[in-house]
Image (cartoon, coloured by chain):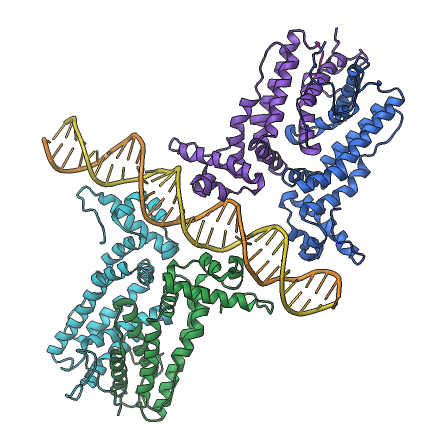
Chain colours: A cyan, B green, C blue, D purple, E yellow, F orange
Amino acid sequence: MITSPSSLRRSERSRRATLDAALELCTEKGYNRVTVEAIAARAGVSKKTIYRWWPSKVGVMLEAFTQVLVGVTPFVETGDIAADLRAHINGLVRLLSTPPYGPAYSGILSEMHHDEELARAVREQLVTPRFEAAVERLRRAQEQGQVPAGADLPLAVELLYGPVYYRHVLRKPSQDEATVAALVAHVLRSLTAGAPPADAPEGSPGRVPGQGRVS
Amino acid sequence: MITSPSSLRRSERSRRATLDAALELCTEKGYNRVTVEAIAARAGVSKKTIYRWWPSKVGVMLEAFTQVLVGVTPFVETGDIAADLRAHINGLVRLLSTPPYGPAYSGILSEMHHDEELARAVREQLVTPRFEAAVERLRRAQEQGQVPAGADLPLAVELLYGPVYYRHVLRKPSQDEATVAALVAHVLRSLTAGAPPADAPEGSPGRVPGQGRVS
Amino acid sequence: MITSPSSLRRSERSRRATLDAALELCTEKGYNRVTVEAIAARAGVSKKTIYRWWPSKVGVMLEAFTQVLVGVTPFVETGDIAADLRAHINGLVRLLSTPPYGPAYSGILSEMHHDEELARAVREQLVTPRFEAAVERLRRAQEQGQVPAGADLPLAVELLYGPVYYRHVLRKPSQDEATVAALVAHVLRSLTAGAPPADAPEGSPGRVPGQGRVS
Amino acid sequence: MITSPSSLRRSERSRRATLDAALELCTEKGYNRVTVEAIAARAGVSKKTIYRWWPSKVGVMLEAFTQVLVGVTPFVETGDIAADLRAHINGLVRLLSTPPYGPAYSGILSEMHHDEELARAVREQLVTPRFEAAVERLRRAQEQGQVPAGADLPLAVELLYGPVYYRHVLRKPSQDEATVAALVAHVLRSLTAGAPPADAPEGSPGRVPGQGRVS
DNA sequence: GCCTAATCGAGACGGTACGTCGTGTCTTCTG
DNA sequence: CAGAAGACACGACGTACCGTCTCGATTAGGC
């Protein structure tokens, strides 16, 4: 990930030691008390070697993190869309609160605010594929009749992920399975309600906004 | 905000110059190219003075930011809950993309990931009051019959704010008035749909977990 | 000493407290770990008050030190020049190794290297008067026939004081009464030997230069 | 000198630039207006590099100074002890009044008052070896019959160096070749005279006091 | 199975910023 | 209304990491 010189001669031992040291230190000290120097020392690797293969600390973390993210939040398809979404979101929630992945991800999120190149990489490699996978999963549910036809699926996905991050970053604690279940249930019900009359109007291209009439 | 020694002898001139310099530099260089030294130099203030009154760079930014946030995203009450929410969220979205406040807020969000003390301060001073004000606004709408009785109002607020932050941080650009309108409309509709049979509660603790089967 | 504004309204209490605090701190921490701030705090006096009456830390020390120096190294006159010189030099040596005066004097000597104004003040107030008093004491001994007529008295005084300072600063420890006695004895003997043929002057300018062939 | 990590990888370029910059600044501003920061800036060297190899500013100065001291005050041996001592002391006197070495040495002397570690280093590296070399030079003169047998040579050396430092620090200006010649002449004569009568007195333990019969 | 070139560990280097300390001045409030 | 209390601008401190850069010493492939 984000590595630069392609080489067959690269030492796999150094690579693994670096990634492992990065995660260990992240657990022990928290993301931003980790330094490249400390990673190098812990891994028994020279700083030069780290900078040869990764652009910065966050690059190392991103590679270390990516390797686990996909594994823990799969898009299983049991046929029950609600159960599948709960499983998926619960995986994400659990990951966010499990060292060293939570701290590592926090660090990545944190740096995305300043580092546009990183942000693009994260979006392209992590966010967008998973976002689209989620939309796709909903689309299959739609085909199976579990979600009404006109529903705004991308918005639905944002309504699922958004609160999870919002709580994680801004409201903090206590995202348990119950709150996840409530969220999933609400969003799924909203799709039924939100399938608009038929005449759908002006919203963002592709989105079915409905002109906000309430009753 | 987060300042320590309370003093009547504090120089208001230094305080203002510091906050102003911080925001200026944030616009010019972006949050994390701003240093305490640069703020001090720009403000014509000594580093010692900054460290006397704020614990760190982000403390300065938080105070500077707080002063404008409340002003730009008021909870007006025109009687039309949808319009009011759109106005409110649009204010927030605009703020997030307006220098220097967007960069400053990004910086604050970024640091909240590592700095638990800061995170607590932000939650207590910014997030929670505004979250509760939003719930309260919805409650008044409920009393006026614009929102059904059994709706889970705190969840509704998370559904409004969550996607805004999710897009801002993870999916990035292009939150315009149309997407905001779509979001607000969807969430409000979902409340109607989500209003549970009759016996259901609405508070966050104990939100109907588990049985989130859809139809 | 070196104080500036003449004032009848000066608080004697503040003056004493400052001098005492300075010497105390000098004993406790050593001269150059003493700060004006610490003196002010210890004395219960404001920094402003200190700076009003003394130009700097060393000014305070100099005043505090001067008050004791004269008392401890008097030019007694028992009639025995050797005994008197031994008493005098022993007083000086003892002072140099007695806290807080030793550290205070070391501090003063130390600062004289950089601070020409201080150096002048010290020379005028301390060194020169005492140097001349020493020459004068020798002159009286000369009149009493204890020192030969042609002797270079100023040089003799330098030969007495010089090694004391040289040892104190550069060769360090162990100046006891025995070494002082040896020094005094040697210098006094040298005056006998050194009294030149007859025509020789004794003042410092014009001291027999050049022809320093020995025998 | 006083450097710590021994390394083959040390940059000679940085070392030289640092020492040169230190001496230059000493000339321009005087010892204690020189800062480590300024040395680093002038030398194009990082502060870290300076602190890696020297414990402090005075450590740098000491190394810079040591390199020249030995060269300028050699113990030549022309066979004429008086001429040789004059040459030696004149070299020292000249050094003390020649920028940048005079200011540098003053700074070192000044700091020796507070910094026992430095004081030890200076004594071991500079003072003691040169003191002993001076004693040795006198001893050779003794063997050649230019100095009487029983003379207290270490005391003689103190009588030579002591007044030079005493004048330099406490009485200040005007040490020219004439005063040096007078001093040397006097001390050498005193050795002859100082071979004591027989009943000789109380000298310091260890020093050949008393029984140094001359002829 | 050598040879040679890239990669490796180690860590010194020029920098930038940190957060702290002390200076000497200036201001505010209090006894 | 003098003085304690202490905030202030300034500037240096010594430290921590940054990212770059030699250095030999492995350590692979390609010959």
Snapshot quadrant of residue A122: bottom left
Instruction: Please name whichever residue, B199 or B97, is drawn nearer the observer in this view of the structure.
Output: B97
Instruction: Please name whichever residue, C18 or D68, is drawn nearer the observer in this view of the structure.
Output: D68
Q: Main secondary structure of the magenta part?
A: loop
The residue drawn where x is 59% and y is 11% is D78
Residue span colored magenta: D148-152
- Whether residue D35 sits left or right of residue B180 in the image: it is right
* Residue B78 visible in the current orientation: yes
The residue drawn where x is 64% and y is 12% is D81
Q: Where is residue B154 in the image (x, y as percent from the top left)?
A: 35, 80
* Residue A30 visible in the current orientation: no
Instruction: Please name whichever residue, D209 or A179, is drawn nearer the observer in this view of the structure.
Output: D209
The residue drawn where x is 29% and y is 70% is B168
Q: Position of residue D51 (x, y in %)?
A: 47, 40
The residue drawn where x is 84% and y is 29% is C136
Snapshot quadrant of residue B13: bottom right
Residue A19 is inside the magenta segment: no
- Whether residue C34 sits left or right of residue A34 in the image: it is right
- Whether residue F2 sits left or right of residue E21 in the image: it is right
Q: Where is residue D177 in the image (x, y as percent from the top left)?
A: 66, 22
Snapshot quadrant of residue C104: top right
Residue D52's place in the image compared with A194, above or below, is above
- Whether residue A77 sits left or right of residue B157 in the image: it is left
